[in-house]
Image (cartoon, rainbow, N blue to C red):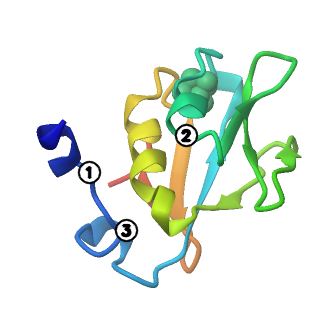
Amino acid sequence: MTVQNADRATAADDPAAGGPGEALEVWIDQDLCTGDGICAQYAPEVFELDIDGLAYVKSADDELLQEPGATTRVPLPLLADVRDSAKDCPGDCIHVRRVSDKVEVYGPDAA
Ligand code: SF4
């Protein structure tokens, strides 16, 4: 488990995320979601499968956001879990971007 933890990034040690204080948001392209549920396993506070079998992001109030392209803020303590969700998402459809300039830092459109 030590190796796995060592691979986990925080905002403080990940330049891509912009460092501490850089707010991130995440959205899912449901058109590409396979419904496997990996994201909801990694970060159930942020992702949830709906009755249609597709994953959606949730608001800070635990509300499922079903509008296309809906975003939610990434809580800093969950950054590693959300990042890993984007990296392991088989649909390549989880997009994590900076709130400030909308640049994607994790996901299929990340530089
Ligand atoms: S990991 Fe990706 S493909 Fe799988 S349920 Fe989540 S968003 Fe959909």
* Residue at 49% across, 68% down: 76
Dot in front, 2 or 1: 1
- Tag 1 residue: 8
Number of the label disc, if any, that sits on residue 94: 2
Please state the horizontal and vertical placement of residue 94, each as a whole percent of the image: 55, 40
Q: Is mark 2 within 8 Å of ligand 1?
A: yes
Q: Is mark 3 within 8 Å of ligand 1?
A: no
Which of the image's four quarters has the N terminus?
Answer: top left
Q: CA distance from mark 3 to mark 2?
A: 15 Å
Number of the label disc, if any, that sits on residue 17: 3
Looking at the image, residue 89 lies above or below residue 16? above
Please state the horizontal and vertical placement of residue 40, each as a whole percent of the image: 61, 32
* Residue at 65% across, 16% down: 35
Q: Earlier in the sequence, mark 2 or mark 1?
A: 1
Pick the front one: 60 or 100: 60
Dot in front, 3 or 1: 1
Q: Earlier in the sequence, mark 3 or mark 2?
A: 3
